[in-house]
Amino acid sequence: MVRSHFLACAAGLVLLSGCLADTSFDTGSAPKIGAIVVGDEPYAVKAAASILAQGGDAADAATAMYFALSVTYPVAAGLGGGGICLVHDPASGRNEEFDFLARDAAGHGAYAVPGNVRGFALLQTAYGTLPWQRVIAPAEGYAAAGFPISRALATRLAASEDVIRLDAGLAAEFMDESGHTRSAGGVVASRELADTLAAIRTNGADALYGGVIGDAIVAYSSAQGGAITAAELAAYPPTRAVPQTMQFGDQQRVLLPGAATGAGTFAGSLFDNLARAQRAPAPTNNTEAAIVAATKQTLSKFGVANLPPDLGATGFAATDSKGQAVACAVTMNGPFGSGHTARGTGVTLARAPSSSEAGYAVAFLTPAIVTDTNGQVVLVGASAGGPIGTASIADALARLGKGEVVTRRGDANTATLYDTVNAILCQNGICTALPDASAHGLGAAVPAP
């Protein structure tokens, strides 16, 4: 059981690692969402919080978080990967889904065509308020000046030692003189990645998809038999769509990725199965029993049996004081993706989703946003890495629907090691950042002005 802490917001930021960060606001007649971010890697969360403190909105914060993660958590969020984000924007009255999953090259091969950079550029252009350069700057600073390896990253580095050892770029950054991965606290930097981020900062997302960087990615792919062409890299198209909407109980409207994606199909099926399980006679309609039953039924339907312990994915969320909410999940389709870094760029390429077990990573990306009947956000969060993360989001919704105070992720006896969920919950005028209890993440809050 995770202990709950209440933190007063007298200072500029409230940060709490590995547990809860509760932020109370004077709500008047309706709940007021605070400016909050939550994710798996603390330095990236701090970068996103700094963007909120500068007046950025949730879209700005989520974009800054992603680019910082590409430096401080590249095992799951590298520039070569892809993902899905959901946005709830009260100002425009829109709910939108941004799809930018890394795709198979037309000629097949081991490397995926990257989507993250174009996807977050589209999101930030549509909903952000700060200049693009400002949201990229924290990531560039980490890469150029260096950052201490967090416990979150160190844990996954150790598990990925064999992958890191085989790539010169990754080994130079993350391995010590003894040939083992560096421990938490060791300072690392990447000049090549910093230069790539500087180009993205000054020239926009297209800097990765053409020019010197794009040419280097294509040349490396060609030399390694990866099959990415200059034309398909330059033409990579992120998409905007209407999210899948489900009614969960009498009071909750749930936004999930669309059914056209594997993630949306799996999550939608699990939520449907949960709703049916809750309507079943006791004791099946017990919340925990219903979650277990729904998860097993969904896994059976999709033929999921044994999963690798690390699918190279992470999820994060952001809200701001105006009610905008963003939930994102990204993946490299395996830890460090293909394990190959394009020379001179610092860009580690994701594994092609059709290769071996890589496709599973996409199926379990579950960004979710939940609103009540008044349109107020109740939950914004994302799971990634495996089915238990998706089940944990469903568990939170089931408990919220019963009026319970949610302070922990659901119990599960089949969780994989890097199957995480990070969420922001708003109940009774109090918004709570819930970093995954089994990881080393962080929740950060910026008090509303």
Image (cartoon, rainbow, N blue to C red):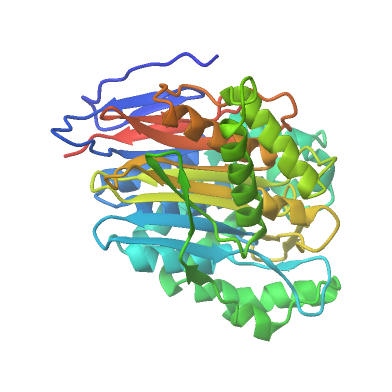
Asked whether 311 or 263 is in front, the reply is: 263
In the image, is 128 to the left or to the right of 82?
left
| Residue that extends furthest to the front in the rendered view of this protein | 281
Percent coordinates x, y for residue 382 in the rendering: 53, 43
**Residue 269 appears in view:** yes
Residue at x-position 29% and y-position 43%: 376
Residue 84: quarter of image = bottom right
Percent coordinates x, y for residue 264 in the rendering: 60, 55
Residue 413: quarter of image = top right
Above or below for 354 versus 367: below
Q: Quick one: quadrant of the C terminus?
A: top left
Percent coordinates x, y for residue 55 in the rendering: 24, 50
In the image, is 345 to the left or to the right of 337?
left
Q: Quick one: quadrant of the N terminus?
A: top right
Asked whether 270 or 99 is in front, the reply is: 270
Above or below for 212 versus 449: below
Q: How many marks?
A: 0
Residue at x-position 69% and y-position 40%: 387
Above or below for 350 versus 336: below
